[in-house]
Amino acid sequence: MTSDPLEYIPAYISPLTDKQHARLGRVVVLWGQVEHFVERLLCRVSGLSWKELEALQITEKPVSAKSKFISMARARLKNPELEKSVQRFCDLLNETKTSRNHAMHGIWGWRANSSGKTVEPGARKTSSPKTPMKMTQLAALEKKLCQLSRLGSDLVGHFDGFPRVKYARFLHHADREPPEWLRQWSKRNPLDGEILDRSAGNGKLPCLSAALPNK
């Protein structure tokens, strides 16, 4: 049996540059943070345990349904300001989910502009082929997801009594809690100002503050 020389070449070549791929990648990373905070808030806002939420099949719902559950449960908090912040989190999630889905589930290719006979990269969805997501729209989406991640972090920190910090790492391991050696590694490789994780040997995360637009 002969090997296929095209086996590991994708059907379509991406129209994005390396920097644009990095921005799209950050959108993926940020959405993972958003879903993490949604799951944390399910318990903290409702007062139910994760096992209880599993029994109600809430944990298996899509993120939009989880957000709706959190929004409905916020009245249990009996704190108008906290309820307002929780609702803001849910509203911001609903504002971003459609664009995020378009960016992640659309097929990226070149969009023809017949009037000027030019092309530009965009993500096409079969359900809305006439309204592709343009690459230029990702900057605003990334910025809003940063806002959403920070708001989720602030809310979970409020419930858990954690102080607010500028930068943090999410440490995880096969165990429930990160082992002590991993905590020590984090201390030896601090999130150092503007270079962030580049101070750690294996970390190659882009500097977000430099990546975001000033406006």
Image (cartoon, grey):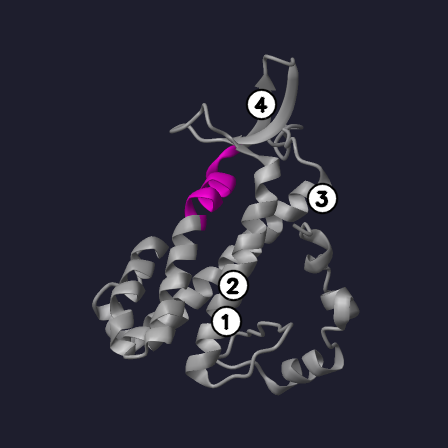
Residue density around tag 2, few if under 14, some if 14–19, many if 20 or more, within 10 Å: many
x, y percent for residue 135: 60, 36
Tag of residue 189: none
Amino acid type at mark 3: Lys
Depicted 98 relative to depicted 159: above or below: above
Tag of residue 149: 2
* N-terminal label among 4 and 1: 4
User: Residue 1: in sight, yes or no?
Assistant: no
x, y percent for residue 56: 21, 67
* N-terminal label among 3 and 4: 3
At numbered mark 2, what does the secondary structure look like: helix, strand or loop? helix
Depicted 7 relative to depicted 24: above or below: above
Residue density around tag 4, few if under 14, some if 14–19, many if 20 or more, within 10 Å: some
At numbered mark 4, what does the secondary structure look like: helix, strand or loop? strand
Amino acid type at mark 1: Ser
Instruction: State which region is magenta.
Output: 96-107
* N-terminal label among 2 and 3: 3
Alpha-carbon span between mark 4 and mark 1: 37 Å
Residue density around tag 3, few if under 14, some if 14–19, many if 20 or more, within 10 Å: few
Side of 205 where 129 appears, left or right: left
**Residue for badge 3:** 19
- Given residues 190 and 141, the one toward you in this image is 141
Residue 180 in which image quadrant: bottom right
Alpha-carbon span between mark 2 and mark 3: 22 Å
At numbered mark 3, what does the secondary structure look like: helix, strand or loop? helix
Tag of residue 111: 4
Amino acid type at mark 2: Ser
x, y percent for residue 20: 67, 41
* N-terminal label among 2 and 4: 4
